[in-house]
Amino acid sequence: MRIALISAACTTALLLAGCGGGATDDQVLFKREKFEFNEEQPVLEYGIEHVTPSPVIEMPMDGVPSLDELAGLERNASDLPEDRLHYGAELAAPGMSSFATVDGDYLLMTPDWVRDATPPTSDLAWAVYSFPLSGYNAPGTLQLWWDTVLPPAGDYFIGLADFGSGRWRWFNGPQSGQALDFGALSGYYSGTDNLYVAVVLTGQGSYSLGQLRIGDNIAPTAVIQADQTSGTVPLTVNFDASGSMDIDGDIASYEWDFTGDGFGAAGSDQSTQHVYSQTGNFLARVQVTDNEGSQRIAETVISVTAIGGNQAPNAVISADVTSGNAPLSVAFLATGSSDPDGSITKYEWDVDGDGSFETDTGTTPAHAFLYTDAGSYNATLRVTDDQGSTDTDSVLIEVSSVGAGSPPEAKLTADYAYRTADGQFNFNATGSSDPDDDIVKYEFDWDSDGNYELDNGANPLAAHTYPQGTHDSTVRVTDGGGRTDTASVSVIYDASIGYSETEANDDSGTADDLGSYAAGGNQVAGWTGNLGAGGYDGSEEDWLVFTAPQATQVQLRLDFLDSEADIDLRLFHESDLANHVAQSTGTGDSETINYSIPAAGTYYIRIYIYDSAGDRGPADYAFSATASTAPVCQFTADPLSGEAPLVVSFDLSSSFHPEGHAIVGYAIDPSGTGSFVDKGASPLFQHTFTGGTYNAVLRVEDEFGAFGTAPVQITANVTYDETEDNDTFDTGNILPSLDFTGWFGNIGPDGPLDGDEEDWYRITVSSTGSRTINFYFTDALSDLDMKLYDTDGTTEIGTSTSTTDNETITYDFTQTGTYYLKTYVYVNSSPKLEQDYMLEIIPTP
């Protein structure tokens, strides 16, 4: 039979990533697993553009059932996502097709309809599908997936049963990367909310229909399983997301979040492992993304407890300033933290109080941060002990915004808090500031009686000579708008004959007060005292006290004659007068303490004769001290990221001291562990970073020994030179030469290469001589070791098995040939985590 066709072009424009079809395209086919829909899972859908097909094709299709015939096929409708999806083999009813054969989940359609053939052929291939979609209100799109070969345009038609008009409505079939969008489908439903779709092929050929879908992409199902969800620290948990699936496509990527603080990079790993080294309840999550961009998340809670008997650490956070105008630089310290039965192994910082600890400084109990925005920030410290127990402490940071019209802020320091040489004191108000940066006048009141004897104009520096006694001095600063502020400092000129100390001062309760020392007075000079039997009063200890209003650097010095008495020096915080925070107990004629005071507080100095000293006085001593607020470390770094080995140029020339002190030294702690590399007196220097992310710390030092720090994160991306498998000596990678650096590999469980715990290398020695082999890594992740073998691959000729961050073997190659190098994870390493490493071979210096 001949069928007259009146056809017109159908224009559509829906692009489906990874789901196109065509004469030569590889089609993304469907999953065959049972689909179980969970409404509780969060869904993140990508938007899809829909384009309406036009014009409608008016045509008869011989053999395609009428709408009246379809009524008897109706079944109960549902609104499950799986009912929007049919395999090619899932016809509306058995036999509801022509010139089409069920082939597993596919439908093989074999039309032979060519009206121009001689004789004409009329075998129309068709199939009818039913979609029970009660309450369906999603986009009315139709997408089809064909296996390998797509029917050509002009021979491929789609019909919708239009129960509103009682007839089929025909459209040209969608081409590769297209989908039909029919808009509202309300007029097409049968009486029981079934939607019928017919697929008709003319021409000649064999085409395998794999899948039909009404509506947009169906989000995947995410499943997470953990081999254990509770235990003691360190807890190793193996996670598995292989149960995740996508009913209408494939899972394209997996992203893992082990602690609930953010997903890592997308990858193809269905399973992974994580070691929990801290106690607490952690939200572990996996986010799966399908081939069309839709995502779902599955999660579980991991509870990690301390080993029985372990006592939790005590976290104590302090800040040098807790309020001020933006931008506000804050130096945090955790030196007051402790662990009663072990040690603290990690300090983490959440500077903005959002619950995410952005910075891990390892074993360094210090961190600096610049607050650029006004607001209240609950800065939090989290410490972890050697058994994985944790504790937190917080401090509130108030950052204010400033603008035009705000008053200035006055600050005043004196070069001495106490002196005996003469009565001249130098005053410095350069630390004063104004939001509009327009201080126009500095006035000085030498006795703080309200009468400003000196109008110093715009000069913040002044000097005054006092008679003996204690004197309060005040500065008044005025800005361009006439707004003012004042600050004062107390100084002592002691011209009396005799000792500076006042007995009895034998304990903290009777300690001599050092006045404004560390509170605006920068130095103590000429303070004298006496200890020992037959002396001033015969006592063997003297106490001094001072109060620091903020974090500062102090240097205490004691000079005496050891032949008269062995005198020692200790510094205490007011909270604990039994345990010192710093001490100097040498055997020479002087003692010196350098100490960074972390926050405002009162401190006591004990000067005493050593308990077992043979000579016990009487002995005179001279005490002196300096104090300095911290300089401000400001910098630029370029680049902040790049391929390893990454050479970063630092410029710290914008660093300064609020009181105008000179910056004399620069240093960098590359890994944030507290170990600084001195870079000398130049603010311009470079540092080379091997692979990884580094929470580095930059440091500046002023002329009085005070330090200022600033953190910077450097990322050195690794392109691995190592290729797997290289797990035996005869499969080892061939190293490039006897003089190279920057060879990168990865080792340890769950690493990005193959997760093995040893890598082998072959060294081709073409000329004899001594060579040094360096193996760089991070011991805190895994304890790695290295061994060198002779040309037989079994005789060990060199080894390096330390517990540091690198291993080194120096060997004199006296014969040419191929030698073998093994790098491996120490069998008893704890922890045992994957990590990047770098190898180099250089001529022995």
Image (cartoon, rainbow, N blue to C red):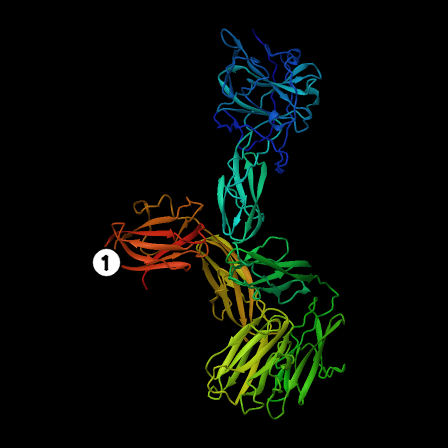
At 55% from the left edge and 91% from the top edge, which residue is drawn? 535
**Where does label 1 land, which residue?**
814
* Residue 75 locus on image (x, y percent): 64, 18
Task: Give residue 593's position: percent from left, percent from top.
Answer: 53, 76
Q: Quadrant of residue 382?
A: bottom right
Which residue type does callout 1 highlight?
Thr
Q: Look at 65% across and 85% down and name the residue there.
A: 492
The residue closer to the viewer here, 132 or 711, is 132
Image quarter of the C terminus: bottom left
Residue at the left extreme of this rendering? 815
Name the element at disc 1: loop
Seen from the viewer's position, the closer of residues 455 and 751 is 751
Q: Measured from the top left, where is residue 588 in percent x and y?
A: 46, 83
Asked where in the image residue 509 lies, by quadrant, the reply is: bottom right
The N terminus, quarter of image: top right
**With respect to residue 310, does 58 lie above or below?**
above
Between 526 and 448, which is closer to the camera in this rendering? 526
Q: Quadrant of residue 806?
A: bottom left
Looking at the picture, does residue 689 appear above or below residue 147? below
- Name the residue at the bottom extreme: 497
Looking at the image, residue 297 lies above or below residue 472: above
The answer to whether any part of residue 741 appears in the image is no
Count of numbered tags: 1
